[in-house]
Image (spheres, grey):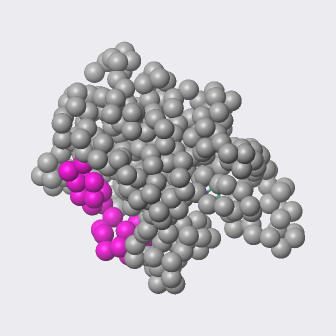
Amino acid sequence: MPESDFDKLKVAALAGGVGGARLADGLARLLLPENLTVIVNTGDDFIHLGLNISPDLDTVCYTLSGLANPATGWGRSGETFSALESIGELGGPTWFRLGDRDLGLHLERTRRLRQGQTLSQVTRDFCRQWGVRPAVVPMSDDSVPTWVYTDEGELPFQEYFVHRMCRPRVSGFRFAEVEHAAPAPGVLSALQSAHLVVICPSNPWVSVDPILAVPGIRSSLQIASHSGKSPVIAVSPIIAGQTVKGPAAKMFAELGIEPSALAVARHYGSLLSGFVLDQTDASQADAIESLGMRTLVTDTLMRTPDDRRRLAGEVLAFGAQAF
Ligand code: FO1
């Protein structure tokens, strides 16, 4: 499919952390902005230092606006940490590395939420200020915090993931109150009108499952996929048994799941029309196809902005074959 044909494609992408944000950025480089909606996990959100923090939403917005720290993938480039140092001097918590500029965002978001604006309204406005043109939408405006079942009891997600560096042994996850959550405005309409749905290379268990658990989202994907109207394509976040970022491989092992592209494909199962896996995992392609989905084997590692664009182009061309 020539790149010019991408102008006709309407895409909804589901994204969590850094890998998801990078593929979303590749998609944004190829699609018309009005044809891309990025639906983002907010299960990682938490209140810290009295502020509303939305790590995955911020990672996506910073990445799409070119403000992201290229080394970590989260937070902003060229950050300073004077406020955090000052908090530390006073004996406050410094385990969650909030930079000065990033803190400005959290202060302003918290102020607006307290005034009664919704998370999707605040996000839309921040994106406009940053010049981010595709729609970036939280999965829900309701709070759906992820809790982690561990051998040390139930822990809030960031406590487990960042503070405890995934050291406690994990046995499962809970998305609190998700049954009462509503998809944020624009989520279901984006899924219903998309020609193609892309599940970005984000952790299936903690970044994508919270999105799918919001009532109405999984069923919209199921209808899209099964009716053949809009294929659902997932990109594996696992390359050669490892995650590119984050300690998810340890998490998988503790959950009794072999960290592999095949395990990810099995996890999404019949939701998918197609699956994109890394060339180092090519030997798993036949087993994945036997699950009833087509496969694309390619280089899925996104080191540079050019890689994001190339991978996004391959995903779009692969998805569009069935469209
Ligand atoms: N991840 C870390 O591993 N350590 C941090 O100190 C940290 C700070 C941080 C600050 C703002 C932000 O938006 C994200 C931040 N992250 C940090 C990343 C983040 O918490 C996780 O990677 C995601 O929640 C998982 O997708």
Residue 301: in sight, yes or no? no
Q: Residue shown at 86%/62% (left/top)? A: 86
Please tell me whether residue 260 belongs to the stretch shown in magenta. Answer: yes
Tell me the quadrant of the picture where the N terminus can be found.
top left
Ligand 1 quadrant assignment? bottom right
Image position, residue 55 (x, y; %): 59, 52
Q: Quadrant of residue 295?
A: top left
Image position, residue 58 (x, y; %): 61, 46
* Image height of 13 relative to 267, above or below: above
Q: Is residue 239 or residue 177 the one in the foreground?
A: 177
- Which residue is the extreme one toward the top? 4
Q: Residue shown at 54%/74% (left/top)? A: 155
Residue 185: in sight, yes or no? yes
- Which residue is the extreme one toward the bottom? 152
* Image height of 196 relative to 272, above or below: above
Image position, residue 172 (x, y; %): 40, 72
Q: Residue shown at 44%/46% (left/top)? A: 183
Q: Main secondary structure of the magenta part?
A: helix
- Looking at the rendering, the stretch of residues picked out in magenta corresponds to 249-271
Tell me the quadrant of the picture where the C terminus can be found.
top left
Q: Is residue 251 or residue 120 the one in the foreground?
A: 120
* Image height of 230 relative to 288, above or below: above
Taking the image as shown, residue 10 lies to the left or right of residue 156, namely left
Please tell me whether residue 202 belongs to the stretch shown in magenta. Answer: no
Q: Residue shown at 48%/38% (left/top)? A: 185
